[in-house]
């Protein structure tokens, strides 16, 4: 079985999708401990003033060592309303935002108690938009290594994209410069149905940024 292992992450970055779109099965780890300062509860967009970091707030704060399956979302902050407003104001003029807006907006009106459910919903929505057909399974016991895996993305979940990242059209690049390896939402709103064509064309360079 050609598979990859990953943490649950919201609206994963472009290089993550370059990796998982080339495998048969994605295994999401329910048992690993949450790690702060990683993609596990945050995603990055390109705003008019530079990099935007959107974080999903957690109950009891982020300094916890519970398994990912047990990490709860703090819904007292109205984070969904705030983040959706940010996405709309940032991308409403991008080429394909209108195409994806109705179904994406629905994700921000659903109620989520656990972080893994938010993250899985975003992965499934993006998988459908990209027309990918890999299977998704779930690890219930933590394993530090999976020798048979094509890649272990749990160890690559810090923002560290290099200068070799291939460029595409970004709405505010003329004032902020190009920002590499953002949430794939940024690429999707620019390339629309051609997003996977762009990823397949640039896969080698993208994987170098993991």
Image: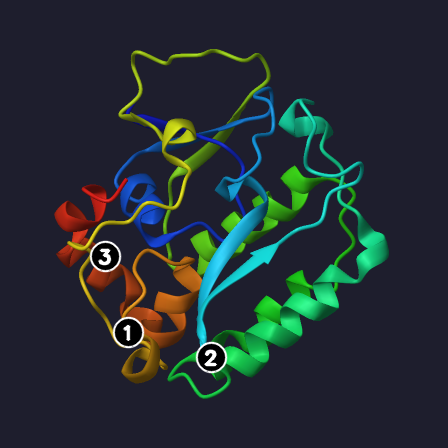
Q: Earlier in the sequence, mark 2 or mark 1?
A: 2
Residue under the point 59% across and 69% down: 103
The percent coordinates of residue 64 (x first, y second) are: 70, 27
Judging depth in this view, the residue of 132 and 48 nearest the camera is: 48
| Label 1 crowd bin: few (<14), some (14–19), many (20+), radius 10 Å | few
Q: Give whichever of 136, 11 is nearer the camera.
A: 11
Q: Residues within 10 Å of mark 2 (few under 14, many from 20)?
A: many
Q: Nearer the viewer, mark 2 or mark 1?
A: 1
Q: Report whether 169 appears left or right of 50.
A: left
Residue 177: mark: 1
Measured in 3D between alpha carbons, the distance from the residue under mark 3 to the one under mark 2, in whole angstroms, is: 19 Å
Secondary structure under the numbered disc 2 in the rendered image: helix
Q: Considering only order in the chain, which callout, 3 or 1, is on the residue closer to the N terminus?
A: 1
Which residue position holds label 3? 199
Give the quadrant of the C terminus.
top left
**SS class of the residue under badge 3?**
helix
Q: How far apart are the alpha carbons under marks 1 and 3?
A: 21 Å
For residue 171, what is the image quadrant? bottom left
Where does label 2 land, which residue?
97
Q: Quadrant of the N terminus?
A: top left
The residue at 43%/58% (across/down) is 183
Task: Say few, some or many: other residues with alpha carbon within 10 Å of mark 3 (under 14 / 14 to 19 / 20 or more).
Answer: many
């Amino acid at each position: 079985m050609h598979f990859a292992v990953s943490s649950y992450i919201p609206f994963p970055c472009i290089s993550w999708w370059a990796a998982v779109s080339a495998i048969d099965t994605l295994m999401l780890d329910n048992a690993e401990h949450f790690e702060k300062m990683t993609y596990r509860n945050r995603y990055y967009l390109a705003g008019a003033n530079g990099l935007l970091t959107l974080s999903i707030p957690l109950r009891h704060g982020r300094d916890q060592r519970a398994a990912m399956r047990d990490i709860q979302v703090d819904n007292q902050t109205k984070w969904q309303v705030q983040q959706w407003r940010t996405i709309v104001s940032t991308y409403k003029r991008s080429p394909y935002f209108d195409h994806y807006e109705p179904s994406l907006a629905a994700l921000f009106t659903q109620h989520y108690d656990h972080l893994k459910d938010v993250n899985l919903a975003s992965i499934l929505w993006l998988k459908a938009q990209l027309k990918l057909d890999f299977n998704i399974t779930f690890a219930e016991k933590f394993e530090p290594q999976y020798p048979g895996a094509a890649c272990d993305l749990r160890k690559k979940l810090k923002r560290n994209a290099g200068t070799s990242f291939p460029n595409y059209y970004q709405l505010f690049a003329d004032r902020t410069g190009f920002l590499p390896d953002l949430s794939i939402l940024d690429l999707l709103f620019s390339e629309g149905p051609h997003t996977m064509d762009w990823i397949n064309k640039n896969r080698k360079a993208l994987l170098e940024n993991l």
